Image (cartoon, coloured by chain):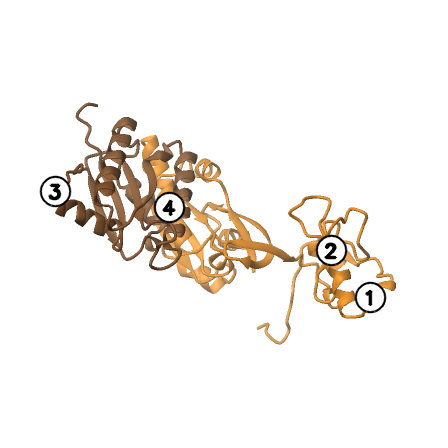
């Protein structure tokens, strides 16, 4: 899923400093699962902003809303009746949400409350880690299910580098060297020879180097 | 400021703090009437949103009182509540409001005098801090 962190209250307060009446809209998709932009988080942000504005002596009216998903036009359409009742709309979805909203309602102002960070999963309650870089050409089968693109600090296709020590990456003691894990797994499985083959340089044209990407499924288009 | 009577909301677990409040009553112990109690089935039930809403609606102080650590009937409810209290403290600090207005306490159902002591301690603390900057009218 897409993982994000909420922006600081100071940053959000600055965005809405001229507003007296806003809508905060959450998303029931990824951001609900990673506890950053679902119903509870919408309530907490709304309450926090109202406290801040009451303290300033400039109270703000905040309506709360939750969309099924903010990355599909049919759900974005659900707020068409109310969207222009506010000075601005704060989206708690990933970066896709405020853009879809802006495209659907060009006269309204939309602010992102979330910093979208990566594709990942929960490794423990409250802890999420990156597992995919969305590079557009998956190679994890060559590395026994461990992705060196997203999990190696240098995205090395041939590793480890000299910065690997005691299973950790040189950039931080909190970062596991994925190449250490790949080598250990290959040894356990008796397939260390796989690593004798030099992996060719990765074709990054399927990633961001190829510009904004699009996926078209002819069988679904209408 | 001498006449300031704080409004304090106490979220109390029914197995410990709420029962301790009952005991304090049975023991005829006096504690400040500033404290308004909300009974919870466990402090794990309390949400960040509940604590913030109390502040938003004008409470000068809020505290959560749960079982002694390791004694929660639902194993981790009081630890979870403590983390939520810490979150709210951080939020208040970010907004320039004294984080001391929110607190977490642990006690057992046998600690009636301690319940009265906590209520007094929190009331004294909030009196010292003065009215909440969010408070616009009498709650």
Q: Chain of mark 2?
A: A
Position of residue A37 in the picture relative to residue A137 (left or right): left
Instruction: Specify the chain shown as brown.
Output: B
How far across and down, in percent of the image, does residue A24 sit? 40, 49
How far across and down, in percent of the image, does residue B70 sit? 39, 53
How packed mark 4 is, by other alpha carbons closer than 10 Å (few <14, some 14-19, many 20 or more), is many
Give above or below for A67 relative to A15. below
Q: Which residue is mark 2?
A: A210
Q: Nearer the viewer, mark 2 or mark 3?
A: 3
Q: CA distance from mark 4 to mark 3?
A: 42 Å
Q: Nearer the viewer, mark 1 or mark 4?
A: 1
How packed mark 3 is, by other alpha carbons closer than 10 Å (few <14, some 14-19, many 20 or more), is few
Q: Which residue is mark 4?
A: A46
Rendered image: mark on residue B28: 3
Q: CA distance from mark 1 to mark 3?
A: 76 Å
Displayed quadrant of residue B60: top left
How far across and down, in percent of the image, does residue A212 sit? 67, 55
Which color is chain A depicted in? Answer: orange
Q: CA distance from mark 1 to mark 4?
A: 54 Å
Q: CA distance from mark 4 to mark 2?
A: 39 Å
Mark 1 vs mark 2: which is more N-terminal? 1
SS category of the residue bearing label 4: helix
Mark 1 vs mark 4: which is more N-terminal? 4
Q: Nearer the viewer, mark 1 or mark 3?
A: 3
How packed mark 1 is, by other alpha carbons closer than 10 Å (few <14, some 14-19, many 20 or more), is some
SS category of the residue bearing label 1: helix
Give above or below for A200 relative to B60. below
């Amino acid at each position: 899923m897409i993982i994000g962190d909420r922006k600081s209250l100071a940053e959000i307060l600055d965005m809405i400093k001229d507003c007296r009446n806003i809508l905060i809209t959450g998303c029931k998709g990824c951001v609900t699962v990673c506890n950053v932009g679902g119903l509870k988080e919408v309530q907490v942000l709304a309450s926090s902003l109202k406290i801040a504005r009451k303290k300033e002596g400039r109270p703000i009216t905040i309506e709360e809303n939750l969309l099924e998903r903010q990355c599909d036009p049919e759900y974005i359409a659900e707020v068409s009746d109310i969207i222009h009742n506010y000075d601005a709309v704060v989206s708690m979805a990933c970066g896709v949400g405020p853009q879809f909203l802006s495209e659907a309602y060009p006269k309204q102002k939309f602010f992102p409350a979330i910093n979208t960070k990566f594709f990942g999963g929960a490794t423990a309650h409250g802890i999420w880690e990156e597992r995919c870089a969305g590079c557009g050409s998956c190679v994890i089968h060559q590395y026994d299910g461990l992705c060196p693109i997203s999990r190696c600090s240098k995205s090395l296709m041939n590793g480890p580098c000299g910065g690997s020590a005691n299973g950790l990456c040189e950039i931080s003691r909190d970062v596991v060297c994925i190449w250490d894990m790949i080598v250990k797994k290959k040894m356990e499985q008796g397939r260390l020879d796989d690593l004798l083959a030099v992996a060719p340089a990765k074709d990054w044209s399927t990633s961001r180097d190829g510009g904004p990407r699009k996926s078209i499924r002819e069988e679904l288009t209408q | 400021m001498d006449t300031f009577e704080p409004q304090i909301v106490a979220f109390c677990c029914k197995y410990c703090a709420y029962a301790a409040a009952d005991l304090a009553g049975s023991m005829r112990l006096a504690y400040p009437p500033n404290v308004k109690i909300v009974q919870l089935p466990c402090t794990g039930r309390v949400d960040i949103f509940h604590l913030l809403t109390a502040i938003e609606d004008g409470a000068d102080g809020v505290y959560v009182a749960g079982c002694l650590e390791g004694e929660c009937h639902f194993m981790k409810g009081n630890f979870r509540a403590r983390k939520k209290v810490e979150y709210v403290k951080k939020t208040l600090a970010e907004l320039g409001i004294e984080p001391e207005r929110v607190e977490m306490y642990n006690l057992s159902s046998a600690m009636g005098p301690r319940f009265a002591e906590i209520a007094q301690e929190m009331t004294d603390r909030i009196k010292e801090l003065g009215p909440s900057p969010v408070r616009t009218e009498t709650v």
